[in-house]
Image (tube, rainbow, N blue to C red):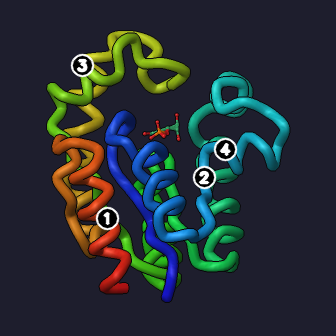
Amino acid sequence: MGHIWLIGMMGSGKSTIGRLVADRLRRPFYDTDELVEEAGDVSISEIFAEEGESGFRVREKRIVQDVASRPPGIVATGGGIILDSGNVATMRRSGRIVLLAVDVETLKRRLGHGGDRPLLAAEKDERLDTIASERRDHYRSSADVIVDATDSVDAVVAAVEAACNES
Ligand code: S3P
């Protein structure tokens, strides 16, 4: 039994779904964004402001390696985790990668003003279009399993659980 790594765009529901699945299966839950913030005692917005996206990616990669060696659980990742092929290799080695796939119009509605996400700080809808199309192939080629995450929370939780049972 390995980790279940949830990947997908900002707003695809990785943290919400991950927590629910972990509760139901009584497995640990990890959230890479939260762990990045805890490790540095600094918020993601501050990291982007002070070190840029590249500084954030270095910290994020360290967390992926750290989580990979922890007891098997459900991991909610940051949306850009798949941009680094080393991260994808680490995730694959330590478990299964499950993509929460959501169409971009749904993401725009869900994300409102973008929340506390530096990459969506300006022109949120345009940025989401660009990021979604740039990353589409990355997400699909990285995933072992693709779950339609526009469905109800219950249906998505059940689909992820099924993926866990096969792992
Ligand atoms: C990012 C997504 C964010 C966070 C950071 C960068 C991205 O996480 O890691 O703001 O590049 O898509 P969520 O996907 O949890 O919003």
Looking at the image, is mark 3 or mark 1 earlier in the sequence? 3
Q: Which residue is mark 2?
A: 32
Count of marks overlaid on the render: 4
Q: Position of residue 63 (x, y in %)?
A: 67, 60
For residue 119, side relative to residue 60 (left or right): left
Asked which secondary structure carries label 4, the reply is helix
Looking at the image, is mark 2 or mark 3 earlier in the sequence? 2
Mark 4 beta carbon near ligand 1 (under 8 Å): no
Q: Is residue 119 above or below residue 138?
A: above
Residue in view at x 30 percent, y 23 percent: 110
Report the Cα–Cα distance between label 4 and label 1.
21 Å
Report the Cα–Cα distance between label 3 and label 1.
23 Å
Q: Which residue is mark 3?
A: 109
Report the Cα–Cα distance between label 2 and label 4.
5 Å
Mark 2 beta carbon near ligand 1 (under 8 Å): yes
Which amino acid, by three-letter code, is at mark 1? Val
Marks 2 and 4 in Cβ contact (< 8 Å)? yes
Q: Which mark is residue 108?
A: none
Report the Cα–Cα distance between label 4 and label 3.
24 Å
Asked which secondary structure carries label 2, the reply is helix
Q: Which mark is residue 34?
A: 4
Q: Which residue is mark 1?
A: 160
Instruction: Name the front one of labels 4 and 1.
Output: 1
Which amino acid, by three-letter code, is at mark 2? Thr
Q: Position of residue 61 (x, y in %)?
A: 62, 60
Report the Cα–Cα distance between label 2 and label 3.
24 Å
Residue in view at x 70 percent, y 50 percent: 35
Looking at the image, is mark 4 or mark 3 earlier in the sequence? 4
Q: Position of residue 102 (x, y in %)?
A: 20, 42
Q: Is residue 145 above or below residue 8?
A: below
Q: Position of residue 67 (x, y in %)?
A: 65, 68
